[in-house]
Every structure is written in C-alpha cells, then in structure tokens.
Amino acid sequence: MKTATKLIHNAHSVDPTTGALNTPVALTSTFAQKDIFVDQEFDYARSGNPTRKALEETIALLEGGAKGYAFSSGMAATSSVLGIFSAGDHVVAAEDIYGGSYRILNSFYKRFGLEHTAVDASDLNAIRAAVKPNTKAIFLETPSNPLLKITDLRGAIGAAKERDLITIIDNTFMTPLLQRPIELGADIVVHSATKFLGGHSDLVLGLAVAANDAIGRRIYQVQNGFGAVPSPFDCFLALRGIKTLKARLALEQASAQKLVAWLQNRDEVDRVYYPSIGDRAALHASQADGFGAVVSFKAKTPDLAIGFLKKVRLAATAVSLGGVETIASYPARMSHAAMPPEERKRLGVSDALVRVSVGLEDVDDLIDDFDKALR
Ligand SMILES: Cc1ncc(COP(=O)(O)O)c(C=O)c1O
C-alpha cells in the first residue's frame, strides 16, 4: 500500500475488542495485573498505554521503521533521542536545525558532556570534516527552517555510514507522506506531531521512529526512564489528525505553490524561499514526494515585513505551523529570537523575513488578503 492508504488502513483502523473505527482512549495510569509472576503487556502507563501504542505502531508503519515512540512534545522526542548518547560523545548537527533542538544541544546536553558541532549540512564535505573520533551521530533537518534549505539525505546518510554513525532526521516539515528518511537509510526519525501530523493546532506531541529494534530499545529505555510521555487523549488526537493528513497537506501544498508564484511577482518581495526554488530543487524532488506547505519570503525592508504581519487578516501571527489555519511568523522575533543578531545575519535569517505555513483557506482569499497587507 502507498503511504496515503496506510494513513487510513493500518493495524489500528478497527479496534479489535469493540470494532470501533477509532482507537479507544485508555485514560488510566495503571493496569490490574492478573498474575504478578507473569509479565503482561501493560502494567503502568508511563511504560505503555494502548492508545499510545496504536499511535507508536502507526508512525512506525508510516515511516517504514521497526519501532515508534510517542512523547509529550517534539522537543521531548528530540531530547529523549539525544539521551541515548553519553558524556564524551559528539554529535554533528545542521546549523539550521529547529532552534529548540540547537538550544538543547548547546545548553542542556553540553552541561552533561555531550559535545556538538554545527555545520552547513548542505555541504557534505563540511559534515565529513566535522566528524571526530568520538562522533556518534549526525542530526539533520530538511528542508530547514526558516530558509527551506535542502540537505542531500542520501549523501549525508552515506557519509554517516562510512563512519558507522547514527543519523537522526527531523521530518516535521515533510511528514512521512512526502519524505521517508528511513527508506533512504536513516536510523532515527523525529517529529513534532504538534505540526502537520496533528494538523489542527490543538495538541503538543512528539514522535520518534527507530529503523531497527536495537536502536528502538535504546530509545525506549529513555522514554520509560525519563518519562516525557504524552497523554492518551493527545495520542488519540494525533491518530485522528494522521487520518486526514493527505487531504490537508495536498490542499495546503497546492495553495503554497500558488502563493509562491504570486509572491515571486511582487515588488515588495526581495526573495521567496520554497523547496521548488533554486538549484537544490531537483535534489529535494529526488528524496521527497512534494515541496510542502511552508513558504518564507524576504520583504524588501524589515518595515514592510512587520507592516505585513500587522495588517494580514487571514493568517494568525503566531509561532508553529502545519495547522488548518494559515500562520505567519517572524523568525527574527520568534523561532530565532535566541540567536545573536550576527549569527542570524550569517545564516540569512533577515529582519525582513516572514515564514508562512499555508492553511486550508481558499487560496484566492489568502492572496487577496496578502495583497492588501503588503500594500
Ligand atoms: C522542525 C521542528 N522540530 C521540532 C520542533 C519542536 O516541537 P514541539 O514544539 O512539539 O516541542 C518544532 C517546533 O516548532 C519544529 O518546527
């Protein structure tokens, strides 16, 4: 089956005990044990819960991995995955990974002795050059945020395999519907399911998928030990969101493409960033099945960008993305606010940059509204 069909038809399409077409929400913290001398699947809900299990098996199926794990946020997923490493280990990370992932590496994990080097991951030689004798993993995100830069997944995974390193890919922007890094050889995929998978801006949840059981066991040890697990109700919301992913993402992506073409012809806009634009478009198309629904644009001046955000009506000015509603964000004051201005400048995160996550509104209404706001 194609991924779109697996969104609907999988081991949890029909509840085996009742025939319900949705997974029951098991709101329980503990489970009665029939015989204390016989292990049973569920004993305590931090260790496992049937609703969470349904979500974990579903994301593992969609990503083509062996095991899935759910967490209380995307950052809990990333942090727990990084928790499989030890003091003295080293991680090579893309310099434009999600700001929260950069922060957890650069502050929290640094204090515990996990070293990291940030590199321009679009340059495979830079990745190779950053690998040290104690390097254990490469952490990537493609397309990147907010400039939608493309990393060569096959090339980077190949470079990691030369040195027996674990590759971790944040697949939040693409979702398994458009990109499946494990099929390209990655070891771990992480998600903020808060975004497209949940899809309705009504939950905070994270997921991790391990390509094989051995890595899965290491992640489970942190999931169970560290305990950053989601509520069963949020797992239900994520399962429900996943069922409509194709319909939402197909429409959002089509609208994003129309918006990109329109933005490219505006005098107020200096540059539009989208995976289909530029010399990495073919590379992206070779590793993903679509360009996604996130678009960034650099206005001619910061005042124009700020004026646009003040006037736009059909986009919420907010952090986050991947919801049914269009969201416009201002990276310099939101996702990248913690970054020193010189570093932002070096990475091209300009004060005139706006990131748009395109929602399900009629795109002609969006364009009309954007036109007024830009004027
Ligand atoms: C690409 C990416 N990864 C991870 C995260 C963190 O996810 P959460 O906010 O669910 O903790 C985000 C959140 O914005 C994100 O955009």
Image (cartoon, rainbow, N blue to C red):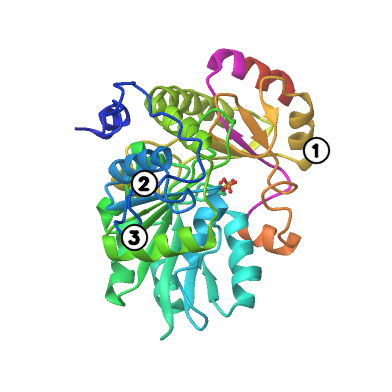
Mark 2: few/some/many CA within 10 Å (<14, 14-19, 20+): many
* Percent coordinates x, y for residue 85 in the rendering: 46, 73
* Percent coordinates x, y for residue 88 in the rendering: 51, 84
Determine the secondary structure under disc 1. helix
Quarter of the image with the C terminus in it:
top right
Residue numbers of the magenta segment = 348-366
- Closer to the chain start, of discs 3 and 1, is 3
Disc number for residue 216: 3
**Identity of the residue drawn at 41% across and 28% down:** 24
In the image: residue 211, left or right of residue 50: left
- Closer to the chain start, of discs 1 and 2, is 2
Mark 1: few/some/many CA within 10 Å (<14, 14-19, 20+): few
- Closer to the chain start, of discs 2 and 3, is 3
Q: Nearer the viewer, residue 12 or 149?
A: 12
The residue beneath circle 2 is 284
The residue beneath circle 1 is 303
**Identity of the residue drawn at 53% across and 62% down:** 226
Which of the two discs, 1 and 2, sits closer to the camera? 2
Determine the secondary structure under disc 2. helix
Q: Is the Cβ of the residue at disc 2 closer than 8 Å to that at disc 3? A: no
**Identity of the residue drawn at 49% across and 66% down:** 82
Mark 3: few/some/many CA within 10 Å (<14, 14-19, 20+): many
Q: Nearer the viewer, residue 317 or 58?
A: 58
